[in-house]
Image (tube, rainbow, N blue to C red):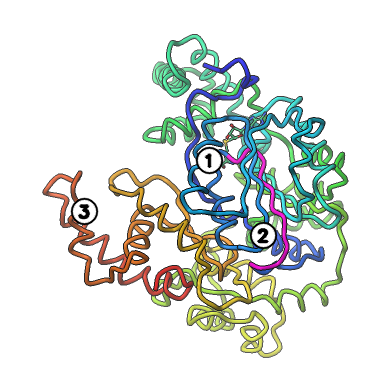
């Protein structure tokens, strides 16, 4: 059920709150360097402007503002329920460097509200582009043209083709059956999905013949209603080819650079040797990306664009990568050196293994890790594996205590957690040392708030009691176990990042 003002996008049920590290400037800068394009990693006190379009409740924008007190963050969405929730969290955490603006992106660039938006160094849009109408997409390009400063970096995620190609009919079926059903968009999505599942069960040729529809339908079981309605119930659902997105953003003088998911930029990790051989016949980056998209099951792309790419040679690029600092986000005992990639399982060699083990011991300059490798000089490979496998994040230079803003937001997040039963939410915790957030489930948010309130690990029994309130007695042991595991494995990391005292 769409609202009169929502132009076919779902607006009767709020979208899920979520934190996605791909939206962080650190990841955008890394993507630029991987694509041989100059970009500087900003520090938390630098005068940086960060803009999020289609922000939803704005968890990522809030984390960004709280972790970086010097930055000015602007978060835009046309759904007043989202803006009210995000602005409420900002008020509760007393963040004074974030502004939530309720505006329709179709018209924003030409309205007087545009005057409120500063020229941005970093722009991000997650889950927006391939769900909105052509009119909204044109409005986004006009806004990017006006509000991305020269050299500014833009992150954009979207449903990609041909990854979603086989599912066009399925989305249409869910949508058509949904809009003919009563109730809110979540009930409509459920009604549409029920029809799709029923048809599959009685032998619908289309729904049974492709693995994508089979897998997608199976994977929708148990997913949150908010996700399903926003994914499938938009009137304008339109997965896109990478080349078409690049052509559209060229209208804002934006050049495509690379993927924000580090490993996706390394054919060695993504393609088989035979596939690489075919791709090697071509130099054009857009055609090479299309070849990659033909070989990979890539359904959601996370692309990075720059307004005015300053190209660098490999040598300068490697020097810039070596100047970066990484910090572990898993404990040393959890180090994985066998990594699942689309081309199979990648087992890293001994030199790389040694560098990775060193990275697990604490903050380290990439150049210092590289020095362990003797003659070996490929910081891009090391970084793509460390960051791409979610074992390290890029760190800022600041090694001091957390700013009060980050502590306040983390307390606000954690004080809302009373249960860990339904923990599908991808939460975050602000960390100034990361210049962004750490992905954190509700349990870690809960523990953080308690510790920022003065409690320590020896309060674990009280935490377990509080979190067991809605848990059946037979499962209390499980709660005890997960709390103790979090204390043993996650607390040292969170201390190291300055998130808890
Ligand atoms: C799938 S949600 C993604 C939210 C958030 N970026 C995230 O990843 O959690 C898409 C968002 O775009 C917003 N949106 C859709 N059409 C819009 C428009 N024309 N103008 C402004 N926001 C819009 C929706 O309200 C919704 O919050």
Task: Tell me if label 1 and label 2 are in contact, CB under 8 Å.
Answer: no
**Picture layout, residue 379 above or below residue 473:** below
**Picture layout, residue 62 above or below residue 141:** below
Q: In the image, what residue occupies the spot 66% across and 88% down?
A: 371
Residue situated in front as seen by the camera: 218 or 179 = 179
Numbered circle sitting on residue 57: 1
Q: Residues within 10 Å of mark 2 (few under 14, many from 20)?
A: many
**Quadrant of ligand 1 in image:** top right
Q: Quadrant of residue 370?
A: bottom right
Give x and y (percent) for residue 21: 57, 56
From which residue to which does the magenta span run? 44-55
Numbered circle sitting on residue 466: 3
Q: In the image, what residue occupies the spot 22% across and 72% down?
A: 458
Front position among marks 1 and 2: 2
Give x and y (percent) for residue 492: 39, 74
Numbered circle sitting on residue 71: 2
Give x and y (percent) for residue 219: 43, 36
**Picture layout, residue 173 above or below residue 155:** above
Cβ of mark 3 under 8 Å from ligand 1: the answer is no
């Amino acid at each position: 059920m769409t609202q009169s003002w929502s132009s076919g996008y779902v607006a009767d049920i709020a979208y899920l709150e979520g934190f996605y590290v791909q939206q962080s400037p650190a990841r955008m800068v890394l993507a630029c360097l991987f694509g041989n394009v100059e970009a500087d990693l900003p520090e938390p006190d630098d005068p940086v402007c960060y803009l999020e379009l289609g922000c939803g409740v704005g968890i990522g924008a809030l984390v960004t503002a709280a972790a970086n007190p010097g930055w000015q963050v602007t978060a835009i969405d046309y759904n007043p329920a989202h803006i009210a929730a995000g602005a409420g969290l900002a008020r509760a955490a007393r963040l004074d460097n974030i502004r939530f603006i309720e505006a329709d992106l179709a018209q924003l660039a030409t309205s007087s509200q545009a005057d409120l938006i500063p020229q941005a160094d970093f722009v991000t849009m997650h889950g927006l582009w391939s769900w909105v109408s052509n009119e909204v997409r044109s409005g986004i390009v006009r806004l990017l043209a006006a509000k991305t400063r020269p050299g500014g970096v833009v992150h954009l995620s979207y449903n990609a083709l041909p990854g979603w190609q086989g599912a066009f009919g399925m989305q249409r079926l869910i949508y058509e059956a949904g809009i003919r059903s009563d109730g809110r968009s979540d009930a409509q999505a459920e009604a549409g999905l029920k029809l799709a599942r029923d048809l599959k069960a009685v032998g619908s040729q289309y729904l049974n013949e492709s693995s994508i529809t089979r897998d997608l339908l199976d994977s929708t079981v148990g997913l949150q209603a908010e996700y399903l309605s926003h994914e499938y119930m938009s009137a304008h659902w339109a997965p896109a080819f990478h080349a078409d997105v690049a052509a559209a953003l060229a209208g804002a003088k934006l050049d495509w650079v690379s993927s924000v998911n580090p490993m996706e930029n390394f054919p060695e990790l993504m393609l088989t040797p035979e596939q690489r051989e075919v791709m090697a016949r071509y130099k054009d980056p857009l055609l090479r990306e299309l070849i990659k998209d033909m070989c990979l099951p890539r359904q959601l792309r996370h692309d990075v664009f720059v307004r005015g790419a300053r190209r660098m040679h490999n040598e300068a690029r490697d020097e810039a990568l070596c100047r970066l600092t990484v910090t572990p986000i898993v404990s040393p005992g959890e180090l994985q050196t066998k990594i699942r990639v689309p081309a199979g399982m990648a087992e890293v060699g001994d030199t790389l293994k040694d560098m990775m083990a060193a990275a697990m011991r604490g903050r380290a300059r990439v150049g210092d890790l590289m020095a362990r490798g003797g003659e070996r000089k490929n910081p891009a490979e090391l970084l793509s594996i460390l960051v791409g496998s979610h074992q390290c994040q890029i760190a800022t230079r600041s090694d001091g205590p957390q700013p009060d803003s980050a502590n306040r937001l983390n307390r606000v997040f954690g004080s809302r957690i009373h249960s860990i039963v339904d923990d599908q939410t991808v939460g975050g915790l602000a960390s100034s040392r990361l210049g962004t957030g750490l992905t954190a489930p509700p349990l870690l948010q809960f523990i953080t708030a308690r510790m920022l309130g003065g409690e320590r690990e020896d309060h674990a029994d009280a935490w377990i009691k509080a979190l067991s309130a809605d848990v059946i007695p037979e499962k209390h042991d499980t709660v005890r176990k997960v709390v103790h595991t979090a204390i043993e494995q996650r607390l040292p990391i969170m201390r190291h990042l300055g998130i808890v005292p």
